[in-house]
Amino acid sequence: MVEKISTRESVGQFLADAGEEFSNLVILGGDLNKSTFSNIFGSKFPDRFFDFGPAEQNIVSVAAGMASTGKIPVVSTFAVFATSRPYDQLRVGVSQSNLNVKIIATHAGILTGEDGVSAQSIEDIAIMSALHNFKVIVPCDVIEALQATRIAIESDGPFYIRLSRPATPVINKKDYKFVLGKGSQLKDGNDATIIACGIMVSYALDAAKSLQDVGINCSVINMSTLSPIDMDIIINSAKDTGAIVTAEEHYISGGLSSLVSQVLSTNIPTPLESVALTSYAESGKPEDLFQKYGLTSEKIFHAVKKVIDRKKSL
């Protein structure tokens, strides 16, 4: 049975522990602190914890001000509220000034489930990847999320880390080392490459196993850093397999599919198929939403077969 651990809960506890190591670490929340588990930090360091209520523009502006005085501010709220609502403040106050603000957002994508469409952030990767200077990370599991959070705190400059609501499968081994800006090859294969991020890495591995059962050997890459994206691993995979499938829990425009497409089109044009959202979702259990909107290993399986057929026709 696959072990599942909550990234939002684990990162919340990590930040509370990191508060002892980094005396200039502060957290700014917005009335969702129990849900993001930033309340653990707040209980431990009440003088370094600030609850603004549902005022995300103010949260980001104050975070920028704190960063300019030498603090390491972490903005903690749901992904949809951390990206869409304060976009002007992120753009002008943080990105253009290249300030040391960390946006660590939970409840991303349609894994948010029963919270409904208004709380399901499916555009956040596109929004944050468009902001110059921001490092954008979508961890595939708790091991990667914890390492990425530490690197964000220790590194200068703005970061966006995308976490989920429910517990998600643990994919990496304990000795895994996250490297900012580098994709991680989880499986070798020469027929096609599946490039995935976040929760879809687990589905990509399941699809690769099913494909191997029918004689198709796929390479699987965990592309946890979306900005800057690992161009080398994309180009090398395109050379090795000649066929690419991307898989993401995000809208098809502006996310992983778009970023990979840009690398391929400007360096090594390659057949590509994408498994992603093509519309807004609705309220429901995550597993039902994933099935209805095509975020499944079966969908990846068929996308691989399709892209291989396209490769053969060239």
Image (cartoon, grey):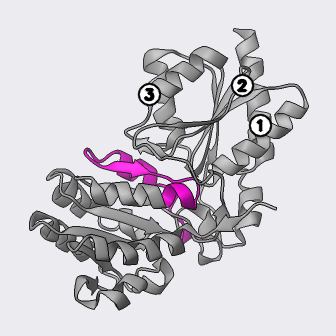
State left or right for residue 32 relative to residue 49. Answer: right
Looking at the image, is mark 3 or mark 1 earlier in the sequence?
1
Labels 3 & 1 near each other (Cβ < 8 A): no
Residue identifier under label 3: 231
Magenta span covers which residues? 117-145
Q: Are marks 2 and 1 in contact (CB under 8 Å)?
A: yes
**As shown in the figure, which amino acid type bears the numbered disc 3?**
Met
Relative height, residue 54 to residue 118 (above, below): below
Q: Badge 2 is on which residue?
A: 189
Dot label at residue 208: 1
Task: Give the mark nearer the N terminus: 3 vs 2.
Answer: 2
Q: Nearer the viewer, residue 265 or 64?
A: 64
Query: In the shown orientation, is residue 119 left or right of residue 154?
Result: right
Query: Mark 1 is on which residue type?
Result: Ala
- What separation in Å lies between label 3 and label 1 (alpha carbons)? 22 Å
CA–CA distance in space, label 2 to label 1: 9 Å
Reply yes or no: does residue 270 show up in magenta: no
Residue at horizontal 45%, vertical 56%? 147
Where disc 2 sits, the SS reads loop
* Depth check, front residue: 74 or 13: 13
Residue 7, percent from left and from top: 54, 67
Residue 292 in view of the camera: yes
Residue located 76% across and 60% down the image = 2
